[in-house]
Image (spheres, helix red, strand yellow):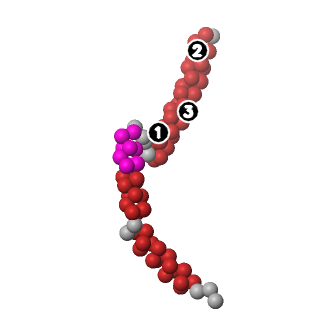
Amino acid sequence: MFNPKFLDELSAKLKDVMASSPAKDFEKNARALLAQGFAKLDLVTREEFDIQAAMLDRTREKLTALEARVATLETQRGN
């Protein structure tokens, strides 16, 4: 019969083996190397990007409103 406890124990043992294996060290070193490389790049977080995109949208809306207002004033001045 299938024993789910056996799979849990096997999974725990595999995690223990992986935690002490060279693969874990490689993963840790690769993450550190990638983090160092990204730190050197001029990157922004998703949150910063979303904030800037929202500001750009508001600026475009204001520009459109100001262009319409200027067109109205120019029309009134031309009369």
- Circle 1 SS class: helix
Q: Is residue 44 above or below residue 21?
A: above
Q: Is residue 56 left or right of residue 19?
A: right
Q: Are marks 3 and 2 in contact (CB under 8 Å)?
A: no
Identify which residue is drawn at 59% across, 19% down: 71
The residue indicated by pointer 1 is: 52
Q: How many numbered marks, from 0 up?
A: 3
On the image, the x and y values in percent for residue 38 come to 40, 44
Q: Check residue 44 for magenta coloring.
A: no
Quadrant for the C terminus, please: top right
Amino acid beneath label 1: Gln
On the image, the x and y values in percent for residue 77 come to 58, 12
**CA–CA distance in space, label 1 to label 3:** 14 Å
Q: Is residue 51 left or right of residue 75?
A: left
In primary-sequence order, the first of circles 1 and 3 is 1
The residue indicated by pointer 3 is: 61
The residue indicated by pointer 2 is: 74
Amino acid beneath label 2: Glu
**CA–CA distance in space, label 3 to label 2:** 20 Å
The mark lying in front, picked from 2 and 1, is 1
Taken as a whole, is the magenta stretch helix, strand or loop? helix
On the image, the x and y values in percent for residue 44 come to 43, 42
Image: magenta residue range: 33-41
